[in-house]
Image (cartoon, rainbow, N blue to C red):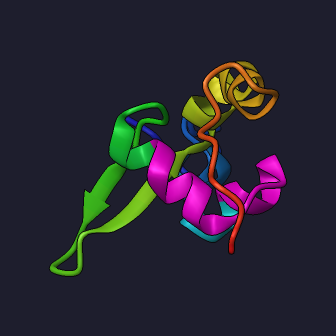
Amino acid sequence: MLTSDTPSPLNESSLRLLTVRDVAWLLHVHVNTVRLWADRGTLPCYRLGTRRDRRFRREDVERSQTRLVELLQGQGAPTRAPCP
């Protein structure tokens, strides 16, 4: 049994889910990039509530960070035609 004197194995920071904005800030990318990665399955996310808001575990973001940076550096980054 856990009492108030017993340290909890789960702390608040490990339970907190990150928003799209939080992840974008951490990775220095636009929020739409985070949404695209989540939709493609490149970045695991959870969909919550009736609005199906995306939430991310910090551990998943940190684990995926190297792969996502490689995408941004040209290994699979989408190209766009210049605007006329």
Please say whether residue 9 is one of the residues in the magenta stretch.
Answer: no
Specify start and end residues of the magenta stretch as a single range: 23-37
Q: Is residue 48 left or right of residue 76?
A: left
Q: Residue furthest left?
A: 50
User: Does the magenta stretch mainly form a helix, a strand or a loop?
Assistant: helix
Magenta-drawn stretch contains 30 = yes
Q: Is residue 46 above or below residue 8?
A: below
Q: Nearer the viewer, residue 66 or 80?
A: 80
Viewer-proximal residue among 36 and 16: 36
Q: Left or right: where does residue 58 sit relative to residue 52?
A: right
Return the x and y of residue 33 as percentages of the image width and height: 60, 55
Residue 77 percent location from the top left of the image:
64, 34
Q: Position of residue 29 (x, y in %)?
A: 76, 56
Count numbered badges in the picture: 0
- 8 displayed left or right of 51: right
Instruction: Look at 76% across and 26% down and name the residue there.
Output: 74
Q: Quadrant of the N terminus?
A: top left
Q: Residue at x 39, y 62 (%)?
A: 54
Is the residue 6 above or below the residue 63 in the image?
below
Q: Where on the picture, by quarter, is residue 6?
A: top right
Image quarter of residue 64? top right
Q: Quadrant of the C terminus?
A: bottom right
Q: Classify 31 as above or below 37.
A: below
**Residue at 67% over, 55% down:** 23
Residue 66, x across and y down, in percent: 75, 20
Q: Quadrant of residue 58?
A: top right
Where 76 sits versus 5, above or below? above
- Depth check, front residue: 25 or 49: 25
Residue at figure coordinates x 21%, y 74% from the top left: 49
